Image (cartoon, grey):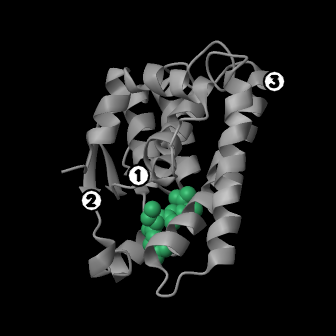
Amino acid sequence: MIDLWSVPTANGQKVHIALEEAGLPYRATMIDLTRGEHRTPEFLALNPFGKAPVMRDPDGPGGRPLVLAETLAIAWYAAEKGANGLVSDDPAIRAEQMMWAAAISSSVAMPFAMQFFATQLAPTPDPWLIETMTGGARRSLDVFEARLAEREWVCGQAFSVVDCLLFPVVATSAKRLDGWLEAYPALRRWHAETARRPAVQRGMAVGAD
Ligand SMILES: N[C@@H](CCC(=O)N[C@@H](CS)C(=O)NCC(=O)O)C(=O)O
């Protein structure tokens, strides 16, 4: 069974949802960042960057154990291993899925993370940083609003690993923005449809208590 060391944040939720949608059995251990559990020698041996989530599959490719960090890498691995169609067999669609998955993990995750640091964690609020990162977060929602106005799921007619990665951005990170999805009707429709999926509900519940 896959072992997952995780956190109840958007990054952790992305991986929980991908594992649930892939139908792979896993055991999640929640890491307490406030107690420095991500800086122990045992954790750093799994991920030298000292960041959750991290996964260990004892039955990886070729039957050998595989340790993976990075949310995108874990979600993509789960999507491929689960063979539930979360990653397309068509090389062109697959390349497009990778582009959107990478964008969510970098161009989108960065302003949302910085917005959280600037508004919730910074000892002294910096108005420039707050405005810049809130603007960046909103502009990334604008991109998905335009896309989802024209297609059911982020990469077309089929739910994919990209939707698994986007859901916590919208359901958790964007919820911190004033008005949440008020100005985003297509994202509201997509969020409601995605939130109805039992695997998404199970993934969001992991570590939530
Ligand atoms: N690029 C990494 C970022 C992971 C990350 O920042 N995880 C946070 C929790 S959401 C963490 O472990 N923070 C601890 C730290 O940075 O010290 C990914 O996509 O998985």
Residue 57 lies, in percent from the top left, at 39, 47
Up-down relation of residue 77 to residue 176 (above or below): above
| Position of residue 132 measured from the top left corner of the image (x, y, whole percent) | 71, 66
Instruction: Look at the picture and state if 131 lies above or below 100.
Output: below
Where is residue 103 shown, x and y percent of the image? 71, 47
Q: What residue is rendered at 64% in x and 46% in y?
A: 104
Q: Amino acid at mark 1?
A: Gly
Res 193 seen here: yes
Q: Nearer the viewer, residue 114 or 200?
A: 114
Q: Nearer the viewer, mark 1 or mark 3?
A: 1
Mark 1 residue element: helix
Identity of the residue drawn at 64% across and 53% down: 137
**Residue at image x 55%, y 74%?**
118
State whether label 1 is within 8 Å of ligand 1. yes
Residue 23 in view of the camera: no
**Between 10 and 199, the one nearer to me in the picture:** 10
Q: Quadrant of residue 31?
A: bottom left
Which residue bears the numbered disc 3? Answer: 92
Q: Amino acid at mark 3?
A: Ala
